Amino acid sequence: MADVSLKEAALIVGVVAACYWNSLFCGFVFDDVSAILDNKDLHPSTPLKNLFQNDFWGTPMSEERSHKSYRPLTVLTFRLNYLFSELNAVSYHFLNLVFHVVVCVVFLKVCKLFLDNKSSIVASLLFAVHPIHTEAVTGVVGRAELLSSIFFLAAFLSYTKSKGPDNTIVWSPIAVTVFLVAVATLCKEQGITVVGICCVYEVFIAQGYTLPVLLDTAVQILRGKGSIPFSMLQTLLKLIVLMFSTLLLVVVRVQVIQSQLPVFTRFDNPAAVSPSPARQLTFNYLLPVNAWLLLNPSELCCDWTMGTIPLVESLLDVRNVATLTFFCFLGSLLVFSLRYPGDSSKTVLMALCLIVLPFIPASNLFFPVGFVVAERVLYVPSMGFCILVAHGWKKLSNKSVLRKISWVCLAAVLFTHALKTLHRNWDWESEYTLFMSALKVNKNNAKLWNNVGHALENEKNFERALQFFIQATQVQPDDIGAHMNVGRTYKNLNKTKEAEESYMIAKSLMPQIIPGKKYAARVAPNHLNVYINLANLIRANESRLEEADQLYRQAISMRPDFKQAYISRGELLLKMNKPLKAKEAYLRALELDRTNADLWYNLAIVYIELKDPTEALKNFNRALELNPTHKLALFNSALLMQESGEARHRPEAKQRLLHYVKEEPQDANGYFNLGMLAMDDKKDMEAEAWMKKAISLQPNFRSALFNLALLYSQTAKELMALPILEDLLRYYPDHTKGLILKGDILMNQKKDIVGAKMCFEKILELDPNNVQGKHNLCVVYFEERDLIKAEKCLVETLALAPHEEYIQRHLNIVRSKIASLGATEQSSFPPGGTAAAGGKKKSFQNLKEVKNEQKATQTTIDNNKGHSKNGKLTEKNSMDKEIPRRSTQEIKDIEKKRVAALKRLEEIERILNGHATQSRSLLWKHWC
């Protein structure tokens, strides 16, 4: 076996790099989204065992909706990518490029078994630059082909060493072969086909048999004229070992998929559900179609499903000529390779084996597949094609007449293929470029129109996306998914009537339930989402909640394991004030999937509605055990701990909020709640920093602005609170508490009675029955020495709140003051004299002290610093004696209670208004 020299390897590396360097600038497109972006198995928080329990897309193999593609070792390499670079697409594409280089080098080593050195390099270079490989190399999910091919070729190379001197058996290479076959199969299913190639190699290459010799030996044995040669017995023994190991792998594979085939629809593979002879004629016609893509890869397409290739429904269809020609050519090559001895026939035979055997799993011969044509499955078959081309080129170049022409043609093929590959890579730059390039090749595939629409939808270009979705429904009128896409886009455009009409059309296209036949076997699981989407649309109308519930129940009746239906129904039942039934729905969903963090999160929300915070917290914790980065669980469990008021929960609440802001650094809510926790812990400077961070991210953050101003007012920084309140009231002119706090500061700190009056009058404009604003306006009238107006104001306030004792006391004080002023005037004290003025000050001192008591019980927002200044007056009158004096400690206790009550009211306001945290209706939302 010839080795690959360093120069040859360097040549291959250079050629591959020249062809695929621009693949590093491509993103995650098409199937990459499901396999990479949406696959939780890549996350370090997911147990490694899940990789061996789930399919390639992260769906449990036990679920009926699973694709049944079992490739755990490929997913493991994705996980390693994620570990080092998370979702940086460059690293994923770079690793694919490296794997392609490895395949090309190992393939060169295989070629040297059957070709001379020059022809082997030609075959390897053609394989390296062939445009058909762009889907396998530039598409990240194509790594399954790359990895499987590495172990596929390695297994074959290992087996070629199993023949010892004098035709003895060397068992260690066979053991390595079996192991490598298993590894190749765990990368992609077609890896198991290398066993067939090893069998052909053993019989026709290693032992040198031809078909006539085998037939003659068999006839002699059957006639009793001879016995089986010892060399043939050894060959049979090796083949039995190979076949037994293969059978064992097949049994294990069947057990993994639990003896269930994946569910495909007629849109994925129309021929698979077509009657005879259309099914057989179409499947046979697909073989020359694939061969033509290898011969002429000028028009490549990422998706060949649906109506891309019309069914061959008649023997008179002209396309049957292509099928017949293909089988005649293939048959002639097969006869030549099996009938005649010699190196040329052996080369052709191995090339045919590499073309045919790895393609069998995708041929629909044994089981239907979910595609019509897939370019990436031609990755291994193209190896046989390249060997055939190189072998043919060698025959031509050996003839002196054709030598120059053969070299020119070879150079032209390699150069044009390399250019095509380089250009094709740019098509994979984004989903939009990929699907638009596909539409240039094929306009009869509704899926392509849908996918362009999805790409535009992701860019929020709903109007243009709608045009492509509508075109999809025109290309394929019975495409359920296309009508669902139209409905969803209409919903995004707030055209609910049109959205409902589209969903109803999609619903009418669903297969009808047939008694005694399992419904799930006749419909794609994602098509059942039409019931979910329609129900989600109509439940926005409060009068149609029961109708929405009926749709959810209909979906569940069709598929009792339809987890999403239980989840959506649980949300609806919460909205319908039926938390117990919602709990039942979520528990049923958890029976289907106990590893779903979103379900535990939703169940926690149900327990919040059931007023059971302890159970709610347990379920939040369960969600975080399964997914430590579950953002909503982090945030809302921290909020629940914060609302509990228990100091022992605050450290953990803080840690979860810190984790949350690490995951969502641009969400101001996380920083705000960190600020609220710091306020609870009396860490004023820390609270101030968190509030400022929240406001920097969201300048109009209502609760952050108010609580920062409140923090300043509580820490003797009232003047710093004023600009914050100005910002608050600029964004929210009707913020009552902000107006009260501003008025309090203006009156007590700035002595701006006019400004304070404007604040309180604004409150009454917004809410004439606001007792707090009305009472404070009465205080302003008192400050203005308009006792008559103050009295009238207090009478009106008392009418609004007749049970508030402090208002009655204030009214008595004002009336007493009016009476004393009347007596003073009768003693010829001049109006507006010092006695009158002094009396007003004394009375207002009493009034404000009582108002401070009122703050402790009624949580009005005035500042004690202002009262202490007025408290410096030394004049006394009889009214002072009626008001009990409070000790310094009592005043401090009252202030503490006032602050706590005020913050709690603000927290309630924040929850009700939905500014600081998500409201309960938002909490009900899940991320499943």
Image (tube, rainbow, N blue to C red):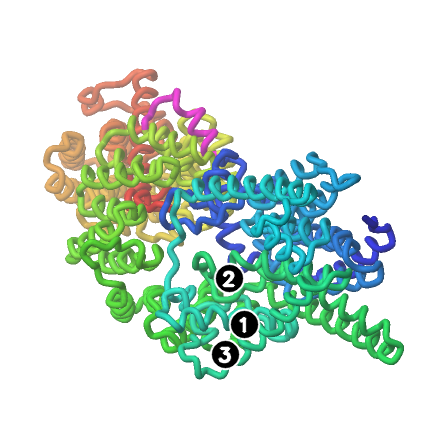
Residue 669 location (% of width, % of height): 43, 42
| Earlier-in-chain disc, 3 versus 1 | 3
Residue 462 location (% of width, % of height): 42, 68
Report the disc number at residue 438. 1
Q: How many marks?
A: 3
| Front residue of 848 and 288 | 288
Q: Amino acid at mark 3?
A: Asn
| Earlier-in-chain disc, 2 versus 1 | 2
* Residue at image mark 2: 363
Judge the density around disc 1: few (<14), some (14-19), many (≥20) Cα neighbours within 10 Å: many
Of all residues, the one furthest to the right in this rendering is 400
| Front residue of 888 and 518 | 518
The quarter holding residue 268 reads: bottom left
Residue in the picture at 35% in, 70% down: 275
Horizontal placement of 818 versus 627: left or right? left
Please give the range of residues in magenta. 644-657
Q: Amino acid at mark 2?
A: Ser
| Earlier-in-chain disc, 3 versus 2 | 3
Q: Nearer the viewer, mark 2 or mark 1?
A: 2
* Label 1: which secondary element: helix
Q: Nearer the viewer, mark 3 or mark 1?
A: 3
Main SS type for the magenta part? helix
- Residue 924 belongs to magenta span: no
Horizontal placement of 719 versus 176: left or right? left
* Residue at image mark 3: 320
Residue 886 location (% of width, % of height): 27, 18
Residue in the picture at 37% in, 33% down: 637
Residue in the picture at 26% in, 63% down: 511
The span from disc 2 to disc 1 (Cα, nearest Å) is 23 Å
